[in-house]
Amino acid sequence: MNDKNETGWLNRRQLLQAGAAAGAWFAFPGIAACAPLPEYKKLASGGDASLYLIHGNVIDVVRGVVLRDKTVVIRRGVISAVTDAPPVTDPQAVLVDLRNHYVLPGLIDAHCHTTLTSEAELNIFGLPATYRQFKRNYVQQFAHGVTTVRDMGAMPKLLHDGLKWMADGDIIGPRVVYCNAFTNLYGSHPDIDPADVSIFSGLALAVTGNPSLWFKDTRELKDRMKKNSTGGASFIKLTMDKQSVMCGRKEIPVYSDEHLRTIKEFSEMQNLPTAGHVHTRFGFDRALRYGLNSIEHSIGDAFVTDQDAFVMAQKSIAIVPTLMIAQMYAAPEAYRELPPQYRTDFIGEELAIRKEYLHSSPDDDVEPGIHRANLKTLELLRANGCEALSRKGKFLARPDLYFDILLKGPENLLKMKSAGVLVGCGTDSGVPFIYHGTLWREMEMLGRLGFTNSEVLQCATINNARILRLADKIGTIEKGKFADLAVFRENPLEKIEACRMPRWVVKEGRVYDVSIKL
């Protein structure tokens, strides 16, 4: 029998066989061989003794200055001092010489999805690579200097597996701040019913957990929010738009005012901040009206006014713009000829950077098979167009929406920054084409928008720490904070590209040389 029928899709028997294999893999991943994960050399750990990182050029991200030739003293995973290089009198102390290197607080990715594997389409015959990528997500973030992430909607059971892997030392990875599942009305964003993807989705979700809370009425909302907030969830993720981001789809259900009042009351009672997916003016207006704590992504269908930005600042509503998703999803492959309104110098530059990255074989950022499959999806888009792919049951983001974000998002963001709105930095990694460990790409894009290097570093460190409500623990290099650090060969205040790859990464006093793969 041929592998595929004449239409190119699996027949029913093959689908059943593949589905059974998928269920077995997710339920019992140990039954199949797995290629080794990336590992990095552990250089030092203070343990009960003091750890001295000596002769480092420490970057004060708040003031945007370099404190040269400093010693960072670490005890039991916490910074106990930042001093001029003193003589070390403790014979048990562990010393690491950072001479000629630059020390940043550990970077923070304030918007990602740790249990998603950046695949445009799940290949049931490639599930070993998919499962391996789940684990790589954490390792890749850490190896690029990210010591804390905010997971903006996960498969809850798989998320807690990942947390256990890191706690047990099976893999290295960042601290994870999370919300568990999206708090979303049934059918709202992300508006893909797993049953539409596979008839075996129920089996998979029983193992991984459903990333969508999906309620139908206020009673279900109250009950499911209580269950979802257990197990360490520290914020609530909302989806504010009434327009789908998917090709071929139009309006989607939205919260009623009663739903939003219920969510706000619950968030205040539980002291859980709220973060809302916003791509449109409709969602933006509701986010302002109900006083969400942060707006995620950028608006594509309207320019904000000075008054809008002022209200955001007055209500202490932050923004994590994730503009790199607009760069990646503004797909010229969807057009025979790019529409005139999108032929700007800025968009042209971003499309050139996009093309260079897509064809760079980023094996350190994703399983090679996943990247190759993603490129094939773009070829399908080029051959068929967005609407035709939707009719075939393919789930791709609407390029026009993201081209519009590239047109309006930069001006909106700069207006917000000028008004004093707190600007964070995140990637949305885990969604198709956006790979974990690529915070540097968003940082460099902020620089191209007009942020100074100092401002970019603030967005990726102290601003993100404030958005996560962890500024007393992370975000700067100060006494009493977690010993989370990223060490670079060059000065990122002078060259933001220095942040692409650290030499060493420190998390709670454990030092790894991420330039050496084991």
Image (cartoon, rainbow, N blue to C red):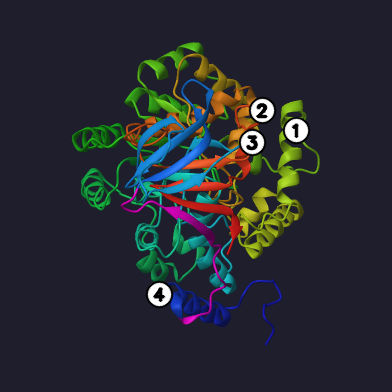
* Residue 36 lies in the magenta stretch: yes
Which residue is identified by label 4?
27
Going by the numbered disc 1, the residue's amino acid type is Glu
Q: Is residue 240 visible?
A: no
Q: Which residue is painted at 46% across and 33% down in the image? A: 85
Q: Main secondary structure of the magenta part?
A: loop
Task: Find disc 3 in the rendering and name its residue.
Answer: 490
For numbered disc 2, what is the local secondary structure? helix
Q: Which mark is residue 258?
A: none
Do the numbered discs 1 and 3 sit on residues whose CB atoms are within 8 Å? no
Seen at 46% across and 23% down, the residue is 62
**Residue 444, quarter of picture:** top right
The Cα–Cα distance between marks 2 and 1, rounded to whole angstroms, is: 10 Å
* Callout in the foreground (4, 2): 2
Identify the magenta region.
31-49
Closer to the eye: label 2 or 1: 2
Give SS at disc 4.
Answer: helix
Q: Residue 29: where, in percent of width, then height?
A: 45, 75
**Pointer 4 and pointer 1: residues touching (CB < 8 Å)?**
no
Front-most of 490 and 112?
A: 490
> Which residue occupies the foreground of this view, 258 or 374?
374
Query: Distance of mark 4 from mark 2, alpha carbons?
Result: 45 Å
Quadrant location, the N terminus? bottom right
Q: Which residue is mark 1?
A: 349
What x and y, as percent, mark residue 185? Answer: 35, 45
Task: For marks 1 and 3, give the one nearer the viewer.
Answer: 3
- Helix, strand or loop at label 3? It is loop
Q: Marks 2 and 4: in contact by CB < 8 Å?
A: no
